[in-house]
């Protein structure tokens, strides 16, 4: 029966992706958005979160691991109608690390074009100007009153106001420094793949205990997702999740070249998946 099948799928998705109770109104529960702007933003966010000390993202802070450490704060990544929702142990801190900041000697760090809409005692609502995408960060705890919430938010974002400067995320439009990074949010062949990988990232970090890094390719080298594996089994589990499980990426195919190396394809986009043993 369809109702029983949907309930089983929802339960399995909740187990695989740490979703808790996933609400399904019929058919297969949606894990991925269809809006091009939302996809483009999520693809960029995926790159930023798939950052490590060994492979820092170009938008990472100088000599720090602000974005590389965010995965340790996350509990749930889920698709909601009209926005991406991320549940976290500390929403204000995560916001402070992905909101754009201009280093005088390093340029823009964080996500260019990301803006604060508002925040409540438990939620931070963000908007990405270039793509029109929405992101809500939902805290695992609720602060007792907006006075405390505002104080904590100021503490977490105080470094954005260094030397009395106005934070980039207070600007109503893109600054010239942010516009220079327009290629970061451009819609490309790999955009749907990167966005889909974001929505399935939680088990990579938590269940499989991996620290993947996304390395953007160039004309002579394809995009790569690299991680240190404990055994060949780790690679198999990743491929199982992405291509054969209930949480699989619809339409994705994997072409194995060695037990620890192959290419994941979605439409005209692709990326090499590499396990370093």
Image (cartoon, rainbow, N blue to C red):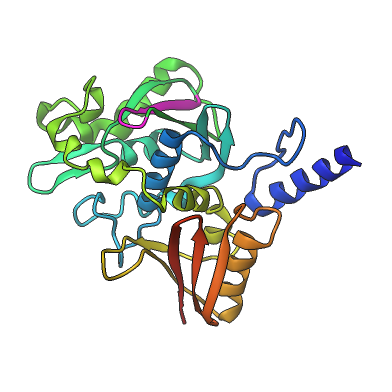
Q: Residue furthest front?
A: 268
Image quarter of residue 252? bottom right
Instruction: Look at 65% across and 43% down and name the residue there.
Output: 19
- Residue visible at 56% across and 45% down in the picture: 75
Q: Position of residue 214 (x, y in %)?
A: 38, 61
**Residue 127 belongs to magenta span:** yes
Name above or below for residue 140 compared with residue 249: above
Say whether residue 190 is left or right of residue 251: left
Residue 184, by quadrant, is: top left
Residue in the image at 21% along x and 33% along y: 160
Relative horizontal placement of residue 15, taking residue 264 as reference (left or right): right
4 relative to 72 in the view: left or right = right
**Residue 229 sits above or below residue 217 on the image:** below
Number of callouts in the render? 0
Residue 173 percent coordinates (x, y) = 22, 23
Residue in front for this viewpoint, 111 or 27: 27
Q: Main secondary structure of the magenta part?
A: strand
Q: Is residue 4 left or right of residue 192?
A: right
Quadrant position of the N terminus in the picture: top right
**Does 25 lie within the magenta span?**
no
Above or below 234: residue 165: above
Residue 255 at x, y percent in the picture: 54, 73
Relative to the observer, which residue lies in front, 3 or 255?
255
Viewer-proximal residue among 246 and 50? 246
**Residue 209, x across and y down, in percent:** 54, 65
Vertical relation: 154 (above or below) 40? above
Residue located 37% across and 52% down the image: 47
For the magenta stretch, what is the residue range? 122-131
Q: Nearer the viewer, residue 77 or 188?
A: 188
Q: Give the residue at the far right of this rendering.
A: 1
């Amino acid at each position: 029966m369809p109702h029983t099948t949907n309930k089983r799928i929802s339960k399995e998705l909740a187990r695989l992706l740490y979703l808790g109770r996933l609400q399904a109104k019929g058919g297969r529960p949606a894990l991925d958005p269809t809006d091009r702007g939302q996809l483009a933003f999520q693809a960029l966010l995926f790159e930023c979160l798939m950052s490590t000390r060994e492979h820092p993202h170009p938008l990472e802070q100088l000599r720090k691991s602000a974005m590389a450490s965010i995965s340790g704060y996350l509990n749930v990544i889920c698709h909601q109608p009209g926005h991406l929702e991320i549940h976290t142990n500390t929403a204000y801190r995560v916001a402070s690390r992905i909101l754009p900041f201009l280093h005088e000697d390093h340029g823009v760090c964080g996500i260019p074009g990301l803006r604060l809409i508002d925040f409540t005692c438990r939620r931070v609502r963000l908007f990405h100007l270039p793509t029109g995408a929405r992101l809500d960060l939902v805290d695992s705890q609720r602060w007792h009153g907006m006075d405390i919430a505002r104080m904590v938010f100021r503490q977490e974002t105080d470094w954005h106001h260094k030397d009395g400067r106005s934070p980039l995320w207070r600007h109503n439009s893109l600054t010239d420094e942010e516009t220079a990074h327009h290629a970061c949010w451009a819609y490309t062949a790999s955009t749907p793949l990167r966005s889909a990988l974001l929505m399935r990232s939680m088990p990579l970090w938590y269940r499989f205990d991996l620290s993947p890094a996304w390395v953007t390719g160039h004309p002579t080298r394809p995009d790569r997702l690299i991680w240190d594996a404990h055994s060949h089994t780790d690679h198999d589990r990743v491929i199982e999740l992405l291509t054969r499980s209930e949480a699989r990426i619809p339409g994705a195919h994997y072409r194995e070249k060695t037990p620890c190396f192959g290419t994941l394809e979605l439409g005209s986009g692709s990326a090499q998946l590499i396990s370093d043993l």
